[in-house]
Amino acid sequence: MAAALTAAQAGLIGCEHCGLLVRAASADEPGHCPRCGSALESRRRQSIERTWALVIAAAICYIPANLLPVLGTTTLGSTEYDTIMGGVVFLYTSGSWPLALIVLIASVMVPLGKLIALGYLLISVQRRSSSSNRERTRLYRMVEFIGRWSMLDVFVDTFTVALVQLSPLMAVRPGAGVMFFAAVVVLTMIAATTFDPRLIWDAGGEQES
Amino acid sequence: MADALDSSTLPQATLTPPRRSRVSAIWLIPLLAAAVAIGIAVNRILNEGPTISILFQSAEGVEAGKTIIKYKDVKIGQVTAVELHQNYSMVRVTAKIDKHAEGLMVEDAKFWVVQPQVTLSGVSGLSTLLSGNYIGFEMGKSSKPQRHFTGLKVAPVIPIDQPGREFELSASDLGSVSVGSPLYFRRLQVGQVMAYQLDPDGNSVSIRVFVNTPFDHFVSPETRFWNASGLDVSLGESGLDVRTQSLVSLLVGGIAFETPSSAVESAPAAADTTFVLYGDRATAMKQPETISRHYVLYFAESLRGLTVGAPVTLFGLPAGEVTDVGIDIDSATTKLRGRVEIVAYPERIVSDIHTVQSASAQAMVQSPEQSHAFFQRLVMDRGLRAQLRSGSLLTGQLLVAFDFFPDAPEAEVDWSPKMPVIPTVPSTLTNLEDKVSSILAKVDKIPFETIGTELAQTLLTLNQAIEGIDKAVNNIDADVTPELKLAIAAFRRAMVTANKVIKNTDETLLGQDAPGQLELRDALQEVSRAARSLRVLTDYLERNPSSLIRGKDGEKP
Ligand SMILES: [Zn+2]
């Protein structure tokens, strides 16, 4: 089957805000919507550059998020600080390996996976790769979907801190790692929305099955 | 339908001048993230303190990642690893010290494990019940940094910054004194026993004591120390007098000191001065002699009844005592003769001299040459001689008396041997007979009957007093001790429970049904109950120390 004609090829552009289909003023500078006046974008502006910046920022934050403690537990006067990996090791050694696995996946693997996935999408788009477009689109949807749920750890941490205040017997305080963890989640979520999935399909004619 | 779409009917986008292209501001985000991350890393590295290792005999309750090191109750580090060391005979504790405490890690810094301890002299380390054991730290005086230490078995008694002075006491035995025993001055606690050890020859024990400032100024070279651990019971004109330094000293031993009023020198003694530790106050204060002179006397008569310790008198006043009684052979005449060694305390005689002359007499006593010359003059011109006299007719005890015999054959003090030899005169039997007969005459006049009844009464009173003491001793067992024992037992039980709970906290307190929370609450209640009852007991004893002797009110014997 022949490649479908894209709106961009037809010199048309849809207003993202009011949905009006307009003719672009020029290929480089699409202009503004005549109905609602918002800037028209054939592709999201500087999508690759912005996504790269956010992914790199998230990757930087990922390091302290894992090295710094996320939780400080004060039990009867002595305070212990736990990093995420420390918590995983503690859960594993204390016998609850399913819980350890969940924490490992949700807190370590998923953010890392998102970073790798976004990096892969960016590189493949920049190299104008035209293979497995559908798979890459599916990967993008997954990254976008997971984003909503990856704040789970931060929420659990926050709730624990708020609930466990049995001072002086026991108190829990957030560690600096939580800030970085939240930063990783937020930055990857923004990066996922900044990335324009239409770019995947721009690289010439794609091979539809 | 797409083909049917006429694109020319679609509206045309409006055009505005293009924005100038520049590097997107979005790159500030990763820059900011990198700056914060690097900032944290740099901060971490800059605040990184030294890592030290401490060797302990046992690291009870010390856990890696949990146990902290405290100085003046401030955290200065945390244990990072605990492992066996040196053929498994020692425990090596590795700890990361905070940056701010880096300067404290010097050669003679001290470390020890703090755990709750109940001893008779007090309860210590109570805070560890809640926070777990920690490692105590004491600053050193050195400025040479060190990273490997050997831990102490027990906490040092005196903090290094406590001002005061150390002295050494030499005692024949340790008695009930132990490390931490209090030191009293006029019944005020002014210091503590720091350490003790058997002297290398095994003949005495040296005890190191610490006197806090400003009380260390009351220790002069003439100060007497005595063991104040016991009850000092004396039967005097005012009745039964029971004295003790304090209740605590009765239980854990104690040492008291005092400077005799006759002391000449009042300047404070230098640190590390050695003193003799006397058995009791009476002995300590009875011998104010710092100057003693030894003499030898030869007698050609029976020495039966003369014992070591028998008094030596001058004009009937105490002037010294007999230190040795034996015989030897006179090298000139090859005859056996009795040899008596005495010690004289010239200061004691001086103290009896009228105040107007005491200053010059004191000066003479201090100078051996002057006193020798004076003594020689007394012997040669005035006829000063030593004589054996009967101290008690009933027991036949003898004493050595110095008196003047102007008619005695001429003699002089022989200064040549190590101990000067003082000439003697034989005792006069007639003198004794006279005395006996005169005494017998007096004895006839004694109203024995009256004395008998009075004596009987006195004995009765004495008997009652003894009975009282007897009962008191029983009461110590029956009334007071069980309470103390119960309180301590309850306390220990509570502590064991608390310790167990703390050990299990991680498993139990975080668990779903959390049995630990219940257990912990019980334990804490138990602890506070025990503490309360111990306090009530000590309060009561403080208000009524006599209850140790007489038992509680309302149970009077
Ligand atoms: Zn519009």
Image (cartoon, coloured by chain):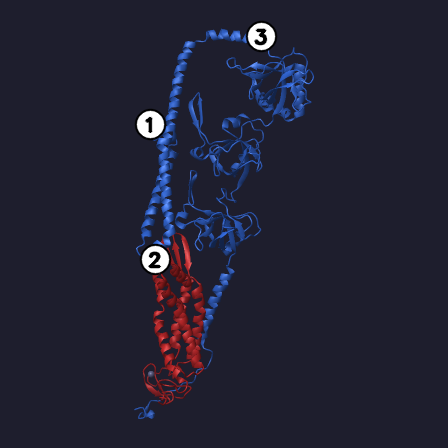
Chain colours: A red, B blue
On screen, B487 above or below B366? below
Tag 3, which chain?
B
Tag 2, which chain?
A
Q: Which residue is mark 3?
A: B430
Q: Which residue is mark 1?
A: B556
Residue A63 picture location, percent across and down: 45, 67
On screen, A47 above or below B122? below
* Circle 1 Cα neighbour tier, 10 Å, few/some/many (<14 / 14–19 / ≥20): few
On screen, B122 above or below B411? below
Of circles 3 and 2, which is in front? Answer: 3
B516 sits left or right of B252 in the view: left
Residue B118 picture location, percent across and down: 41, 41
Residue at 47% x, 66% y: name it: B37
Q: Are marks 1 and 2 in contact (CB under 8 Å)?
A: no
Q: Nearer the viewer, residue A99 or A5?
A: A99
Assign ligand 1 to one image quadrant.
Answer: bottom left
Q: Secondary structure at mark 3?
A: helix
Q: Nearer the viewer, residue A94 or B259?
A: A94
Q: Quadrant of residue B307?
A: top right
Residue at 44% x, 71% y: name it: A59
Q: Are marks 1 and 2 on the same chain?
A: no
Q: Are marks 1 and 3 on the same chain?
A: yes
Residue B534 visible at all? no
Of circles 1 and 3, which is in front? Answer: 3
Q: Residue furthest front?
A: B87
Residue A113 visible at all? yes
B136 sits left or right of B544 in the view: right
Q: Quarter holding the N terminus of chain B?
A: bottom left
Q: Which residue is mark 2?
A: A164
Name the amino acid, label 3: Thr
Name the amino acid, label 2: Val
B174 sits left or right of B478 in the view: right
